[in-house]
Amino acid sequence: MASQPQSGPAVRFDHCWGCLVENVFVAGAQNAFWVYAGFHIHFHDVFVTQAVSNGYAFTFSGDTSGKNCNADIGNCTTRLDVVDLTDFHVDEALSGHVVPGGCIHVTGFVATVWVRNGTCNQTHIAVKTDCPRELSHDIGTCPQFIDLYRLESEINAAGDPGDSACILALDIVHFHASAYQCYGYGPPDNLMVFRDANDSGSAHVELDNPYIANARHDCIIDSVLDFKLSGGDVIGCGTEGTTHAGARHAGLHISARPSSHVSKGATIVNGTNFCTGYKEKAETSMVGVRIDEGIDYASIQNNIFRGCIKGVIMPPTRNTTNIVTGNTPE
């Protein structure tokens, strides 16, 4: 498996309408399933084991090279729309001398992806979204709507802590995750990174009741337009024990978007447990929330900062449009 991996997928669908994959087991493939373009593709009860770092269990892709794409992207023949991945398990075959492979990759013109009731066990990345610039500069032809429900991710960052993560979401329109369990083994530098790489101003992220634990630096980096975190636990961040770039590691780092002339939208953090979560432990080396310069319209309310060095760190020139109130302790 590790000595002579193949580069192509074990199973590939091109321009399929209504393909169904059920009760399938794939072992030792660098890439297991690849879906390019098409409509209404359904996976359920699928088990995958992999071995190599640059492969994925599932790749969903589309682009704007097909008929009607320039005139009417709604009828673009190379768009992928409606993928349903349900009741699946991905388990990395760790050999000790290779970086574990990835779980799910959504790239290019992919309109809707539903992921439910699955595990990404010991992968170096669980979910990655991106939109190659050579395909399109239009956010309307990048990953559109990604919805995750009850996904369990255990990340093995062996050999690649900088690029390992539960979620690496670039160039997205709307990303929603509910009851997501994300744990860093190794651990990685960050567990979730949301970044509007194309700087389009269209990225919206919502996290509901996640469990996010164990990162060397910041657990979550938010530099998209609108971001909302509700409930859950963000604990054990900053395990490296030192500051990064002169600032304390945080559970949530609210960062300015790439272009300084485009203001960030709204950030809402409500009802989340930070730092030591539900257990009484010694003080950790992390802060709860870090807000960078240039951030407007952040609302950090009704959270628990237990065992944090500090609950919220803000720049000295605090903008009055940011509200921090009702947290315990303040």
Image (cartoon, helix red, strand yellow):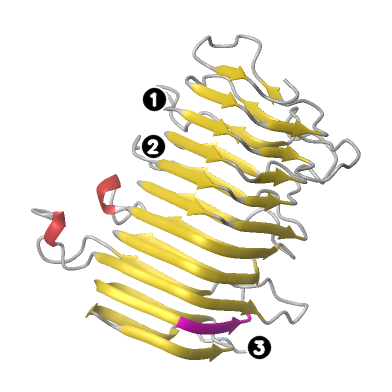
Q: In the drawing, what numbered circle is on residue 21?
A: none
- How far apart are the alpha carbons under marks 3 and 1? 47 Å
Cβ atoms under marks 3 and 2 closer than 8 Å: no
Cβ atoms under marks 1 and 2 closer than 8 Å: yes
Quarter of image, res 112: bottom left
Asked if the magenta segment contains residue 49, the reply would be yes
Left or right relative to 25: residue 67: left
Identify the residue at horizontal 75%, vertical 51% (top origin): 214
Residue 14 x/y as whole percent: 27, 79
Mark 1 or mark 2, which has the lower sequence index? 2
Mark toward the viewer: 3 or 2: 2
Q: Secondary structure at mark 2?
A: loop
Q: Circle 1 sits on which residue?
A: 262
Mark toward the viewer: 3 or 1: 1
Q: Circle 2 sits on which residue?
A: 199
Residue 212 versus residue 65: which sits nearer the camera?
212
Cβ atoms under marks 3 and 1 closer than 8 Å: no
Q: Secondary structure at mark 1?
A: loop
Residue 77 x/y as whole percent: 16, 68
Q: What amino acid is labelled 2 in the image?
A: Asp
Residue 26 versus residue 22: which sits nearer the camera?
22
Identify the residue at horizontal 51%, vertical 86% (top origin): 6
Quarter of image, res 314: top right
Asked if the magenta segment contains residue 47, the reply would be yes
In this view of the protein, can residue 164 be seen by the observer? no
Q: What amino acid is labelled 1 in the image?
A: Val
Helix, strand or loop: magenta stretch: strand
Identify the residue at horizontal 43%, vertical 80% (top origin): 44
Q: Circle 3 sits on which residue?
A: 3
Give above or below for 127 relative to 4. Answer: above
Q: 10 Å neighbourhood of mark 3: few (<14), some, or many (≥20)?
A: few
Mark 3 or mark 2, which has the lower sequence index? 3
